[in-house]
């Protein structure tokens, strides 16, 4: 039985990847850090009684800022594959916590690579590093591919730049099977609530159900290449199954402005919007409401821009070229953006109906 270790197992990607690897017959170990409340919602359905003799999913307390702990977990679990997904992953928040982000996202990657070397597992353990399209930052070339120069635009992206290069360096210096997946944005119903897609689908659901008055967003002009997380964890696995360790761009090749994602989300509920104004003055009002369940008055302002969500330096345009992944990995995304938006909208409407939420916090992020 192959053994995998996933850091960040209770995050969006960790949950989908754990599910995929369990389906493939792996023994899956997950690293999660201790929190004051239980935050395993995304992986609760995978839980197995640790006392049962044939348990294939185990959680370990750990942290990317604690080398001795990472060394011990790797020594105990002797993984064939490590997927390093743990990170402070919010770009805007990284401007508030730059030092911590560098430690967890940058040096954290080094800690894992060094642990493999210290334990002399270079010839056994393959490692996947969760690199990101944020590395491209300020546009140098479109579409962005494996050879496009990097120009990171946030403390998060700079930390991930270190993670990218230290992975390449350990591959070249010590012959380790260590790879970067340069993944463009990928979303799902499990996406964290403060990333823009989930903030929009949650906000649209809550507004339609009369639980929230308005959704405040930042830069509506930014364009992202959005895929589905389920497709992207399949690519991570494929990257570690090749004869030769290499780095790959994983993307759909289609880019969409945030504004259009908002339009698509509301449209899924039968609510049509018109955007007026520019920059921090832009708003969206309801022009039609086709769904009798969600009665919203025509002219109601449901989206407004709040400059507090603007970033000190923004990444305006991301569009990836996944040709290498398609050719070498045989990878192909199964979901398109319309299906992704539909799935996220349906899920959030259901969530609010079930929870019977009466008041919503304004999301920060
Ligand atoms: P999430 O934010 O959903 O998950 C991040 C995970 O990392 C969580 O389990 C979190 O735990 C954990 N974590 C954070 N800090 C630490 C730490 N110091 N020690 C141990 N665990 C920690 O991210 P995603 O699942 O969306 O992304 C997975 C990875 O891929 C991340 O590295 C991200 O930067 C990268 N990436 C994501 C893309 C995307 O579009 N989703 C695109 C490209 C790259 P907790 O729940 O306790 O916070
Ligand atoms: P991103 O994702 O920064 O691309 O990083 P996010 O969804 O946070 O932002 C995408 C774009 O939307 C704009 N935006 C807003 N963003 C947030 N969060 N909240 C808002 O209210 C808002 N309004 C507009 C942003 O300015 C940005 O341009 C994600 C993370 O998953 C990273 O970990 C990962 O590496 C990259 O994707 C690829």
Image (cartoon, grey):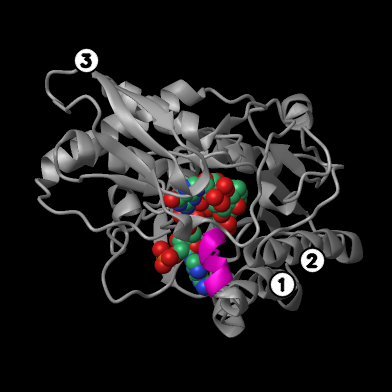
Pointer 1 or 3: first along the chain: 1
Q: Confirm or deny contact between disc 2 and disc 1 (CB under 8 A).
A: yes
Q: Nearer the viewer, mark 1 or mark 3?
A: 3
Residue at 56%, 67% in the rendered image: 94
Image coordinates of residue 222 in percent, x first then y, are: 59, 41
In the foreground, 228 or 7: 228
- The answer to if 300 sits in the magenta stretch is no
For label 2, the SS is helix
Q: Can residue 13 be seen from the camera position used here?
A: no
- The answer to if 92 sits in the magenta stretch is yes
Q: Which residue is mark 3?
A: 290
The magenta stretch is 86-96
Residue 126 lies in what quarter of the image? bottom right
On screen, residue 108 above or below 254: below
Q: Can residue 162 be seen from the camera position used here?
A: yes
For label 3, the SS is loop
Q: Which residue is mark 1?
A: 110
Residue at 34%, 38% in the rendered image: 201
Mark 3 near ligand 2 (CB under 8 Å)? no
C-alpha span from label 3 to label 2 = 53 Å
Residue 341 lies in what quarter of the image? top left
Pointer 2 or 1: first along the chain: 1
Q: Which quarter of the rendered picture does the C terminus lie within?
A: bottom left
Image coordinates of residue 50 in percent, x first then y, are: 31, 63
C-alpha span from label 2 to label 1 = 7 Å
Q: Residues within 10 Å of mark 3 (few under 14, many from 20)?
A: few
């Amino acid at each position: 039985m192959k053994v995998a270790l996933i850091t960040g197992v209770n995050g969006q990607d960790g949950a989908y990847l754990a599910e995929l690897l369990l389906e493939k017959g792996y023994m899956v170990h997950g690293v999660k850090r201790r929190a004051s409340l239980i935050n395993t919602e995304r992986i609760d359905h995978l839980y197995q009684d640790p006392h049962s003799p044939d348990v294939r999913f185990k959680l370990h307390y750990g942290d990317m800022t604690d080398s001795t702990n990472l060394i011990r977990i790797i020594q105990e679990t002797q993984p064939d594959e490590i997927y390093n997904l743990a990170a402070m992953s919010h770009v805007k928040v990284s401007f508030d916590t730059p030092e911590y982000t560098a430690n967890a996202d940058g040096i954290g990657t080094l800690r894992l690579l060094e642990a493999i070397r210290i334990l002399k597992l270079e010839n056994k353990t393959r490692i996947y590093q969760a690199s990101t399209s944020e590395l491209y930052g300020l546009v140098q070339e479109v579409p962005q591919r494996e050879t496009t120069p990097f120009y990171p635009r946030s403390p998060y992206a700079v930390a991930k730049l270190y993670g990218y290069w230290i992975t390449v360096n350990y591959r070249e210096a010590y012959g380790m099977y260590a790879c970067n997946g340069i993944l463009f944005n990928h979303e799902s119903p499990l996406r964290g609530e403060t990333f823009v897609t989930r903030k929009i689908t949650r906000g649209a659901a809550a507004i339609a159900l009369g639980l929230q008055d308005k959704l405040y967003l930042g830069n509506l002009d930014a364009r992202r290449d959005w895929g589905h997380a389920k497709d992207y964890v399949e690519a991570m696995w494929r990257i570690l199954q090749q004869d030769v360790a290499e780095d790959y761009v994983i993307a759909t090749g289609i880019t969409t402005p945030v504004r259009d994602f908002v339009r698509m989300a509301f449209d899924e509920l039968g609510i049509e919007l018109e955007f007026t104004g520019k920059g921090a003055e832009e708003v969206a009002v309801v022009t039609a409401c086709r769904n009798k369940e969600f009665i919203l008055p025509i002219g109601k302002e449901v989206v407004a821009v709040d400059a507090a969500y603007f970033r000190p330096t923004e990444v305006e345009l991301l569009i990836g070229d996944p040709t290498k992944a398609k050719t070498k990995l045989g990878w192909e995304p199964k979901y398109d953006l319309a299906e992704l938006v539909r799935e996220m909208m349906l899920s959030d409407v259901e969530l609010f109906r079930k929870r019977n939420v009466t008041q919503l916090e304004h999301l920060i992020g």
